[in-house]
């Protein structure tokens, strides 16, 4: 019986901007390069946990799950984060910018780090909770690096909201999912995120589910069914 996410066939890559757990594409890389999915874990989790979300994703793309740069505690299984809150609860903008910059550098290093030719026009970025926050920061700060985003059960920082409302990610797609019983980030956070993206001209698919601060087989299938048709393997 499988316990936890299926991370079979993955390899931990170190030496780049961030350590990352990589699943290389089945069948090798096309001449123009493989699509890539970057998956960002949430607070207190690790790079293996986020593979829960990719169980239905096409196995012909490369999946890269980086490890957060800051340790939360000494849990032997790994407990990491991407930002810390200020007194008002919003993420510290300096720390958030540093984590976002590390993801941007990782994306630019993908081909060298993984040994897989990556198509730079087909890099999608998703994440859960604090990982979704990072995907929104990336869309606001480095939109040229991304083909689309998939924030799950997440929220947006004030700085990213301003940029996204201004249209920096206009015309690109996003898949946003949130639980109506989310006890950590209430459903209003997901609805606000949807409204921000739509205001900035993003092509948003928004899904609400009857669960808390988690994902489910249904939401993971919807995640994959949104992403898979957009991938090109010529």
Image: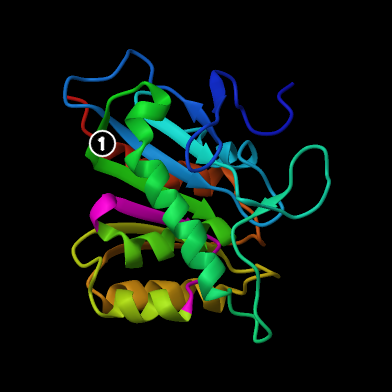
Camera-side residue: 14 or 28?
14
* Mark 1, other Cα within 10 Å: few <14 / some 14–19 / many ≥20: some
Could you say which quadrant of the image residue 174 lies in?
Answer: bottom left
Quadrant of the frame with the C terminus: top left
From this view, report whether residue 74 is shown above or below residue 152. Answer: above
The answer to whether any part of residue 226 appears in the image is no
Please report the residue visible at 39 percent of the width from the left and 47 percent of the height from the top. Answer: 105
Q: Is residue 28 left or right of residue 216?
A: left
Instruction: Return the residue found at the far top.
Output: 27
Instruction: Return the residue found at the far front.
Output: 15
Q: Is residue 1 magenta?
A: no
Kind of element beneath mark 1: loop
From this view, report whether residue 147 is shown above or below residue 201. Answer: above
The residue carrying mark 1 is: 231
Highlighted range, magenta:
144-157
Could you say which quadrant of the image residue 182 lies in?
Answer: bottom right
Please report the residue visible at 52 percent of the width from the left and 71 percent of the height from the top. Answer: 94
């Amino acid at each position: 019986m499988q316990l936890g996410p299926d991370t079979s066939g993955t390899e931990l890559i170190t030496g780049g901007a961030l350590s990352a757990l990589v699943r290389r594409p089945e069948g090798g890389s096309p001449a123009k390069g493989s699509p890539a999915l970057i998956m960002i874990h949430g607070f207190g989790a690790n790079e293996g946990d986020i593979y829960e979300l990719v169980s239905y994703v096409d196995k012909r793309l490369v999946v890269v799950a980086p490890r957060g740069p800051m340790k939360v505690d000494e849990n032997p299984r790994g407990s990491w984060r991407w930002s810390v809150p200020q007194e008002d609860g919003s993420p510290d903008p300096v720390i958030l910018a540093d984590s976002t910059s590390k993801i941007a550098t990782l994306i630019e290093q993908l081909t060298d780090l993984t040994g897989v030719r990556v198509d730079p026009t087909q890099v999608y970025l998703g994440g859960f909770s604090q990982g979704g926050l990072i995907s929104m920061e990336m869309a606001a700060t480095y939109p040229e690096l991304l083909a689309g985003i998939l924030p799950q059960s997440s929220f947006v920082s004030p700085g990213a909201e301003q940029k996204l409302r201004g249209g920096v990610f206009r015309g690109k797609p996003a898949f946003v999912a949130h639980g109506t019983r989310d006890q950590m980030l209430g459903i209003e956070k997901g609805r606000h995120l949807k409204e921000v993206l739509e205001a900035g001209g993003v092509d948003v698919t928004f899904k609400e589910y009857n669960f808390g601060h988690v994902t489910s087989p249904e939401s993971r299938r919807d995640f994959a069914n949104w992403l898979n048709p957009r991938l090109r393997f010529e």
